[in-house]
Structures are given as C-alpha cells and as structure tokens.
Image: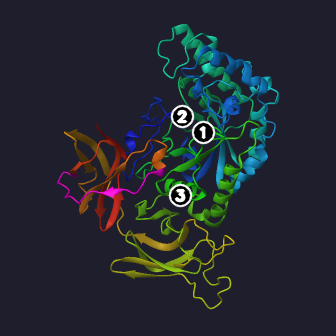
Amino acid sequence: MIYRILLVCLFFTGTVSAQRNDVVEDETSSSYNLNKPEREEWLRNTGAGLFIHFNVDAQLGVVISHSLVGASDDYTERYFSELPKTFDPSLFNPKDIAELAKLAGMKYIVFTTKHHAGFCFWDTKTTDFKITNTPYKKDLLKEFVKATREAGLDVGFYFSPEDFNFLYKHKIPISRNINNLDEATKKEYAAYNRKQTEELMQNYGKIDVLFIDGDPKEAVKETAWKMQPDILITRGAILTPEQTLPGAKITQPWLSPITMGTAWQYQPTNERYKSGSQLIALLIEARSKGGSLLLNVGPKANGALPNEQEDRLREMGGWYFINHEAMDSVRSWVVSKEQNIYFTQKAPGTLFAIVMDANNWKEGERKTFLLKSAKATANTKISVLGQNSQIIEYKPDLDVSSRFKQTVNGLELSVVKAQRIYDDHRWPNPVVIKLENVVPVFTEAAMVQSGDDKVVAGVATLNGKVLNHTKIKPERARFYYRPYLGQVETLYAGAWKMSPWVNIKPDGTFSITLKLPKGAYEYKAVVEQQNVIIEGENKVLNLP
C-alpha cells in the first residue's frame, strides 16, 4: 500500500519541536509543511483514526493495486476492463462503520478515494475508471462523507498521485519508479492529479485530513492547501511511520498507519489478524510516545466489513469506553514507559500508568507496582479507570481499595482489578491507574540515539550516544537486540535480548561488540537514568 517512512529524525527520545515549513525526511520527498499549528495540535489530541482501504480488485482478494506492477499485458488489460463490470459494493454501510469507529475511540476516518491503480470512488470527470461506471453506479465517496459527518467524526481522504491507469492509457510500463517521463507527459500527469484534487476539495464540503501516498505529490499539496487552507495533510507533510511504531517518544506530530492483519485491503484467505489486545497495545504505545494510531480495515468486495474486523473494533470499543481519559488529549510523560507499564499524562500532575501485562491478572486480585519516574505529593490521589474501587461483585467483604505509598525506592501502587468486563471474569486487556497530583523524578530525560553499526568478520559493533550528555549524565548503557522478522512481522517478534551494561564516555557515546549468527537483527540503544530505563530508536543490522 504505502511507502515505509525513513524516520531519520526519530532516532532519539526527548524534545523535538515541530517547525513551520520544515523539511520532512522520508521516501516521498516532501518539501514543505503548510499545516496550521491548530490542526497539528488537533492531531496530537487525537488518539486514533480509522483507515479504510478499498479498491476494485477487492473482488480478487489480492494486494491492493500492486499486482499491476510487473503484470502481463493480459492481466493488466482484464484488470482495467473487466473488474469494473462486476464491482458492486452494495453492502457498504458507512453509517455503521462510522458509528463503530466512534465507539472504538476514533475521531476521524480516512477513505481511499483513489489508490495506485487509479480507480476513483467518486464521479470524476477525468477518467471512466470510476465507481459510477460499475453496477454500483452511485458516488460512494459522497455517502461516506455524509455518514462520517453525521456520526460526528472528521472526514479524511487518502489520495494517490501515482496512477497506474494513467500510465496504462499512455502506454507507459507500470512501475513504482517513473523517472523518465518526457516534459509534456509530466505536465499532463500533474494537471491530471491537480484536477482530481480540485474535484475532491470542492465537491464534498470541508475535508479535515488528507493522506497523500506517492508521487508526484506537489501539485496535490498545493491544490489542497489553496482550496482548503484548514486541511491537515498527514503523509506528505508530517511523520507517518508505516506498519511500525517509533522506538522512542517524540514531540513532533506523527501517526502510524497499521493494518489489523498483514494486508491493507481485505484478504479472504491466508491472513493473520492481530488480536484485539494487540491492537489496544499499539494504541497505548502510540499515545505514550506522543503519536496517534491510524488503524486500517478493508471491506469485502460487497462493501461489508468482515466479522473479524468488526469484532476487534468492538473489543477496542469496550476498552476505550472504560479508559478514554488516558487516550484523548494526552501527552507523553517524561519517559514513555517503565518495564511493562506505559504512561500518558493530562495536564501537569495527572499521570496514567497503563499496566500492559494484565492477561493473567485475575478479577479480585491485588497487585503492587513500583514507579521510579514519578513521586507523590501531599495531594496525590489514586484510582483505577472504570471502577470505583469500593465494591466487587459477589465478594462484599473483599478490600478492593486503591492506595499508594512513597518509598525510598519509588512510588508504590497497590490496586485490585475489581470490575467485571467479561462473563468469565477474564478480561485480558490493560488496566489504567490514574494518579493525580504527582511529579516526575527528573524533568528532562536522556535523549538516546541508536547509532550506526559496523560489521567486521562476523562481529557487530553497535554504537549509541546520549545527545544531551552535557546536561544529562545517565549511569550506564546497553543495547537491546533480537532477530528482525520484517516490516510487518516485527509486531510479532519475540522478547528483546540484552547486552551487558557498559560505561558511557564523557562525550556521551557508548558501544558494544556482539558475535551473532548470520541474519538480520533489530537493535536499540538503552540508558539508565536514576534507575529508569530509557530506550532509543529501533535500527536494523544485517550480518552477512
């Protein structure tokens, strides 16, 4: 579906200011950013959005658009001529989808108006490869916009300037790298995309979000910002790491588009869906690192949302209903996590400690947690979101109160899981502890850079650096590493292995050598600051 962003400027934690007209370093070569600050602030406050990938080739259950690259003449001709004749998403129900998205905590929905294949979901005047030339006949995009607005959600458009149908009609081989177009064709290509953008910007009212995927994108950006100055352009202007989350927290606005399974478009067979718990964990991690999750679904060819996708959204909806405070309008804490507890904060002093490892936490069981990055004040209060911590069903004499104690080792929390969510009393999803009137142990965290690696004779040297070492002096450093399974599969990777601790040099640098079997590995630099572990960005190492 989308390019993977090279997060050059994400290789550290700490403070990064989002500047106007900044250059975003990614494969799509964005050159400028005219997003209004208040629109980017809206994104910072927005925990999640829903992404919908849909295309005429959903009928085949194949990868969206990309099967055209390198395809035979027979395949290509039948793709463009035959698939529209049988495409009829008559069960597409944007009202139901929008209401479900809102229940799951989404604040906006982004729909694929045109993917790389060039099929348009609106009644465009630029091509006959469009939804109104199918048995469906209607302008599906108009129905989507209306339903999304009525649900109280913001409207987002995905748009691909890459257009394989345009290339096909101009007898240009379909490729992802079109660098040899003559000047006349380049101008026609840009004008084609500009005209389509004009239609999208003027025929559907106010559009809140635009996700531009591919090149040539400049005509699209210029047109969108000119016609709708308040639009927020995400990919094309801000960071959008795909199918992964940054390893470190940042303060620039960013979002991660991630699929429910492995595919962007509906894949009826050979698909592996993430569990509802995994999706909730991705949302939490994104928010703890200052970003937003753009979670993707793909309707079936008839337009209906698959049961597997609906079920997972409903599980997310149950969790969000309980814990919305910890996701909406929050910011990162001084560190994003401690061990398996992630953090978000709302205004200075209100901290949410999100206990991720709750699968085996039995209802009615008391657990104790020690936080090293926060300390209590005279006015500190503690509670568990969703429950009153006074009553538990069927156990009237059980003490389920929430309490805390400041110790020399850290802030000790003691809480009971006391709310019944599932019939079998086995709700497996994270528990959120709300702490009011607490303060951080330190006001600035180390900014950890995972440096480049060097491989000599099968031995890898990993390098790291504390970028703010003149002010912050962490006690020691190490590296986490594990086999790298690929862009999508990294979400299913195993536990991190840990190198021995090493000393940090006066200039903030540190390194370690590891002898590992041949293969690909992901790694990240880690430092310890006042007994708190702070992680750097993930990088990939190849051992030939």
Cα–Cα span, label 1 and label 3: 19 Å
Q: Nearer the viewer, residue 86 or 188?
A: 86
Residue at image point 63% right, 18% down:
76
Residue 189 percent location from the top left of the image: 59, 16
Q: Residue 161: x and y, percent? A: 58, 25
Q: Earlier in the sequence, mark 2 or mark 1?
A: 2
User: In the rendered structure, which amino acid carries the disc numbered 2?
Assistant: Ile
Pick whichever of labels 1 and 3 is earlier in the sequence.
1
Residue interval drawn in magenta: 492-509
Mark 1 and mark 2 in contact (Cβ < 8 Å)? Answer: yes
Q: Secondary structure at mark 3?
A: helix
Structural distance between the alpha carbons of marks 2 and 1: 9 Å
Residue drawn where x is 67% and y is 49% of the image: 309
Q: CB of mark 3 within 8 Å of CB of mark 2?
A: no
Q: Residue at x 64, y 15 (%)?
A: 74
Q: Which residue: 58% across, 67% down?
A: 428
User: Where residue 346 sits: x, y (%)?
Assistant: 53, 63
Q: Which residue is mark 2?
A: 2
Residues 229 and 235: in front is 235
